[in-house]
Amino acid sequence: MTRKELVTIAAGAARMEGMLELPASPIGMVLFAHGSGSSRHSPRNGLVAARLRDAGVGTLLLDLLSAHEDRSYENRFNIALLTDRLGQAASWLGTEPLTAPLSLGLFGASTGAAAALQLAARDGSGIAAVVSRGGRPDLAAVVAPTLLIVGGDDGVAVDLNRQALSELRCDKRLLLIPGATHLFEEPGKLDEVAQAATDWFVRHLGTRL
């Protein structure tokens, strides 16, 4: 039986709200960082999260900005702020009794992907694996196993991710999904994202348990 709980995580004066869901005997944990203009209620991230839980991975779908903060265009694209918030959420998961023992992965979309990759590059982050969906990554010095997923018809993002892949010095893969655009709205394309992300996290999160 899946445990489901609405959680609130302090971030200075702000509060981040998220939905934590843990299957029975989870093999790992994935923290989601959505893109600008989206939220923890995103049906795209929700589909991926459901597939992960089916595979035994816990998920936390989180709003990194409060409703008030999200009204600011500048906040939505403040990658440093989003990265700090993601780090605070990761630290919170590391202190909660049910999630602390689990290896942690990050799934980021668009601007959330940039934040996920920057957090994974920090010394001592403890991130076990990263998946970037439709991001334009600033990879810095990521050492965690990293999967970049890009729509084959996503224009400049394809070239940017190919360049980023060449700069990574870790277990890495670039998956181009033919016929998919930035939001993977074409029939069946998001299912391909979900399956690829699930395979990646199951492979890398389970190795530390």
Image (cartoon, helix red, strand yellow):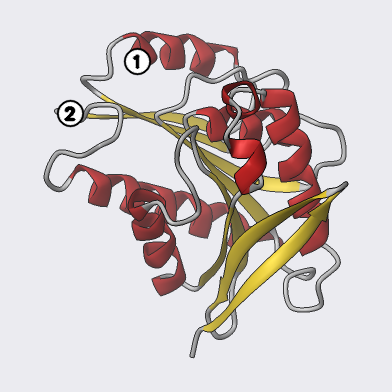
The secondary element bearing badge 2 is classed as loop
Which residue is depicted at the point 43% across and 56% down? 41
**Along the line of sight, the residue nearer the viewer: 204 or 60:** 60
- Mark 1 or 2 closer to N-term? 1
Check disc 2: other Cα within 10 Å, few if <14, some if 14-19, many if 20+: few
Query: Which image quadrant for residue 138?
Result: top right
* Left or right of 65 on screen, residue 122: right
Position of 113 relative to 89 (above/below): above
Check disc 1: other Cα within 10 Å, few if <14, some if 14-19, many if 20+: many
- Residue hosting label 1: 158
**Along the line of sight, the residue nearer the viewer: 24 or 66:** 66
The amino acid type, in three-letter code, at marker 2 is Pro
- Residue 1's mark? none
**Along the line of sight, the residue nearer the viewer: 150 or 44:** 44
Q: Is residue 209 visible?
A: no
- Residue hosting label 2: 178
**Distance from Cα at disc 1 to Cα at disc 2:** 11 Å
Q: Is residue 50 visible?
A: yes
Which residue is depicted at the point 37% across and 9% down? 159
Which residue is depicted at the point 52% across and 31% down? 172
Q: Position of residue 156 (x, y in %)?
A: 34, 8
Q: Position of residue 71 (x, y in %)?
A: 57, 34
